[in-house]
Amino acid sequence: MRLLPEAHLPASAVAGAATVRPHGGQFGTSGAPRQSGIMGPMKGALTVDEPQGERWDLALDLLSNGPDLIAIGPEVLLHRETAGPDPDGLIHIGVVANAPRERAQSEVDAARGFVDHLAYKDERFGSLLRQFGVTWEYVEDGGTLTVTLAKVSDAGELVWPDS
């Protein structure tokens, strides 16, 4: 049984080119660049290694209040889209691409299980996901921006722009 609400994915979100989103927020210089194909902390993101402590509490506050980028480990990016010309207010969960396209689905499945586990461990996090709604994306980190490579459907399947 899934602990999270199903991802919100309007049909219009699947059509067209990849989405490019700059990293921003007040943590613009805290990250390190990717090295040797391994994702490090994202530039512009508050990096959290575990769901406890002051950094986790700050991450929950940022997620509740607005568009700051949060990296949970090297594979998951979160932000709530509250700024820009057409904010949807949803929590966007980005699974960072770190494998060939053939293995992308297994990365998404693992990340969804990881986020479910976090929501189970901390009811505050689960409550935020339910309160604001969630949309999932498979993303590439460009250092100072994030590029959406594919959307993730309600069923957890990757939806590539070219399919």
Image: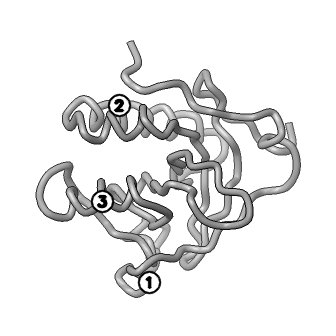
Mark 3 → mark 2, Cα distance in angstroms: 17 Å
Residue 157 screen position, x and y as percent: 64, 28
User: Circle 3 — which element?
Assistant: helix
Q: Please tell me which of labels 2 and 1 falls first in the chain.
A: 1
Q: What's the residue at 72%, 57% (across, down)?
A: 86
Q: Looking at the image, is 142 positioned above or below residue 103?
A: below
Sequence-first disc among 3 and 2: 3
* Lateral position of residue 87 relative to residue 65, left or right: right
Question: For the residue labelled by badge 2, is the local secondary structure a helix, a strand or a loop?
Answer: helix
The residue beneath circle 2 is 116
Q: For mark 1, does the 10 Å Cα neighbourhood hold few (<14), some (14 to 19), or many (20 or more) residues?
A: some
Mark 1 is on which residue type? Gly
Q: Is residue 89 left or right of residue 121?
A: right
Helix or strand or loop: what does disc 1 sit on?
loop
Q: Residue at x 54, y 73 (%)?
A: 23
Q: Report the residue marked by disc 1.
A: 28
Mark 1 vs mark 3, CA separation in Å: 15 Å
Write down the quadrant of residue 119 in the picture. top left
Please report contact status of discs 3 and 2: CB closer than 8 Å, yes or no.
Answer: no
Q: Is residue 37 above or below residue 96?
A: below
Residue occupying the far left of the picture: 53
Is 39 left or right of 99, judged from the image as shown? left
Look at the picture and state if 115 lies above or below 57.
above
Between discs 1 and 3, the one toward the N terminus:
1
Q: What percent of the width, then of the height, locates residue 136?
A: 57, 41
Q: Identify which residue is drawn at 65% across, 56% down.
A: 87
Q: Which residue is mark 3?
A: 59
Q: Kindly identify the amino acid type of the residue bearing the numbered disc 3.
A: Ala
